[in-house]
Image (tube, rainbow, N blue to C red):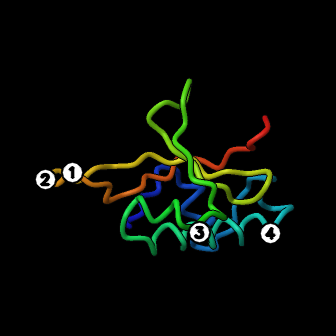
Amino acid sequence: MEILFQNQLLADLYEGKKVNDKRFKSNPTIVKQYVKTVNKLSAISRIEDMYVLTSLNYEKLSGDRNGQSSVRINDQYRLIFEEILSETEPFQVTMLALEEISNHYS
């Protein structure tokens, strides 16, 4: 699956660059888990493959986040993204646009 970073912070974290966000400066473990999660997402070929990887806890979001989906990075954080369909038939999800890392319980 192709990955598109909608947020420069997410791209910098993935590339191993230093960031000023204190959530990630003080917790290098979350950065490692984030990179591992993105690698899992890029390795899948179909959106249905996410259901097989139960550790991701893939879910489509509703309410304020209707049209977005998420996977778990760990028990506290989730990665929120938008699924982008191909422009030609058969219309399939070909790209994931990563938007943010969210504290699941805030």
What residue is pinned by disc 2?
88
What residue is pinned by disc 3?
14
Q: Amino acid at mark 2?
A: Thr
Mark 3 or 1, nearer chain start: 3
Q: Amino acid at mark 3?
A: Tyr
Q: Amino acid at mark 4?
A: Pro
Structural crowding at the residue carrying mark 1, measured as other residues with C-alpha within 10 Å and reported as few (<14), some (14–19) or many (≥20): few
Mark 4 or 1, nearer chain start: 4
Q: Amino acid at mark 1?
A: Phe
Structural crowding at the residue carrying mark 3, measured as other residues with C-alpha within 10 Å and reported as few (<14), some (14–19) or many (≥20): some
Residue 16 x, y percent position in the rendering: 64, 74
Relative to residue 90, is residue 18 drawn left or right? right
Check the picture and name the quadrant holding the N terminus. bottom left
Whether the residues at callouts 2 and 1 have beta carbons within 8 Å, the answer is: yes
Q: Secondary structure at mark 1?
A: loop
| CA distance for labels 2 and 1 | 6 Å
What residue is pinned by disc 1?
91
